[in-house]
């Protein structure tokens, strides 16, 4: 029995030495895992094999072998713990080294876009009018003949229909709006005076295209209705707008004109920004660029929307956004806005 105890103690000592020796070259968690199973494993570890024969020993033998086994076990466990920590640290350092961020490296260039010059112009114009108390509203691009023409005092046989060559969807009924003026009717029908609104949006005309004419362009409509406004209010408002948008250096002028839905009517021009009024291709050698049409809202239009023309009056205007941008930035070709040419767009 004594021999058997001795032999077991010996065996435990051999296990201890072998385990420590085999732990030496272990460098990965996977290898450590294997080592753990081999020596300390609950099912088939080498210590477990010795524990299996313990019940057959004498009391003293059990105590001596048990003590030695516990000592070996806790020594191996503490080696395991220390090595696990070492490997963990080593792996962490390797990961940190592999994923190291070089903060001195130049950043990746992400090109940032910016607003299209027409969008920017619309925003600048509406901002000026918002400061004057106007509300910004929008309306449909597909309109009925009633809103685009009839309600604006342009009946079916009216010659002024020819002023705006129309893209019809259903001839005589449905069309791509040729102007933003139909929104005058929609706004007035939906509200009671006082009214102050500006309406930016796309309009469409079946026209010959050249340096200042497009078939699809943008307008901003303006409408003010109250009980005391006059042509002087209209001129003051539009002059203020021109000064705010273009600065003090540019001149504006009003020319008598005709629109079926305003009386009296006028057009406002601004001195050409390309040639400073000397005459060039942009201004067709006149020194002026036409910006907008305007006038006092016709009594027939007021009656059409249920406003009493004896009580209320107002003015309206409609400006071409492309023309405003041409004049503001001194551009000599309207088609550049839709050319998608980055060399052009990057300049704004
Ligand atoms: C009108 O469209 C009227 N609805 C304006 C108006 C509103 C008058 C309210 C009175 C009261 P006109 O056809 O002139 O008017 O166009 C207005 C502006 O749109 C012009 O002054 C011009 O700046 C711009 N415009 C007209 N046709 C074109 C085009 N083909 N391409 C680019 N801009 C244009």
Image (cartoon, rainbow, N blue to C red):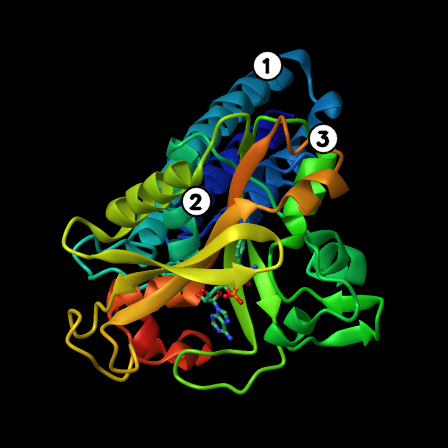
In the rendered image, the vertical position of residue 196 relative to residue 108, given as above or below: above
- Indicate the secondary structure of the residue bearing disc 3: helix
Specify which label sits upstream in the sequence, 2 or 3.
3
Residue 142: image location, x then y, percent = 74, 62
**Inter-mark Cα distance, 1 to 3:** 13 Å
Q: Is mark 1 within 8 Å of ligand 1?
A: no
Question: Where's residue 74, x and y in %?
Answer: 48, 24
Say few, some or many: other residues with alpha carbon within 10 Å of mark 1 (under 14 / 14 to 19 / 20 or more). Answer: few
Residue at 34% from the left image edge and 55% from the top image edge: 99
Residue under the image location 41 percent in, 52 percent down: 26
At numbered mark 1, what does the secondary structure look like: helix, strand or loop?
helix
Measured Cα–Cα span from mark 2 to mark 3: 95 Å
Q: Is residue 210 above or below residue 121?
A: below
Along the viewing direction, whichever of 330 and 267 lies nearer the viewer: 267
Q: Which quarter of the image is occupied by the N terminus?
A: top right
Query: Would you name the residue on which mark 2 appears?
Result: 126
Please identify, in this view, whether the residue under mark 2 or under mark 3 is nearer the observer.
2
Q: Which residue is mark 1?
A: 63
* Residue sitting at x 50%, y 86%: 209
Work out which quarter of the rendered image holds the C terminus and state it. Answer: bottom left
Identify the residue shown where x is 24% and y is 70%: 330
Q: Nearer the viewer, residue 151 or 181?
A: 151
Q: What residue does disc 3 label?
A: 53
């Amino acid at each position: 029995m004594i021999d058997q105890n001795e032999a077991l103690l010996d065996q435990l000592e051999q296990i201890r030495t072998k385990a420590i020796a085999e732990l030496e070259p272990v460098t990965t968690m996977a290898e450590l895992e294997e080592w753990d199973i081999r020596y300390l494993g609950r099912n088939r570890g080498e210590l477990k094999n010795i524990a299996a024969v313990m019940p057959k020993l004498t009391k003293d033998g059990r105590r001596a072998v048990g003590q030695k086994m516990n000592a070996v076990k806790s020594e191996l466990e503490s080696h395991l713990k220390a090595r696990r920590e070492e490997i963990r640290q080593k792996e962490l350092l390797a990961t940190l080294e592999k994923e190291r961020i070089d903060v001195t490296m130049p950043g990746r260039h992400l090109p940032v876009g910016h607003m299209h010059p027409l969008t920017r112009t619309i925003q600048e114009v509406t901002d000026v009018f918002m400061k004057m108390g106007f509300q910004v509203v929008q309306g449909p691009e597909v309109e009925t003949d009633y809103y685009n023409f009839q309600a604006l005092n342009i009946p079916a046989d009216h010659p002024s229909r020819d002023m705006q060559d129309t893209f019809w969807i259903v001839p005589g009924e449905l069309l791509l709006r040729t102007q933003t003026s139909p929104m005058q009717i929609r706004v007035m029908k939906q509200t009671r005076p006082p009214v102050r609104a500006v309406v930016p949006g796309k309009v469409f005309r079946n026209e010959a295209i050249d340096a200042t004419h497009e078939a699809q362009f943008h307008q901003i409509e303006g409408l003010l209705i109250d009980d005391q406004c006059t042509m002087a209010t209209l001129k003051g408002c539009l002059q203020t707008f021109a000064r705010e948008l273009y600065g003090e250096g540019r001149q504006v002028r009003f020319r008598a004109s005709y629109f079926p839905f305003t009386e009296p009517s006028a057009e406002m021009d601004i001195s050409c920004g390309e040639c400073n009024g000397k005459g060039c291709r942009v201004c067709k050698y006149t020194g002026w660029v036409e910006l907008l049409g305007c006038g006092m809202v016709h009594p027939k239009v007021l009656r059409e929307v249920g406003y009493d023309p004896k009580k209320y009056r107002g003015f309206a205007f409609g400006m071409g956004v492309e023309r405003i941008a041409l004049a503001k930035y001194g551009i000599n070709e309207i088609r550049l806005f839709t050319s998608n040419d980055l060399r052009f767009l990057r300049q704004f």
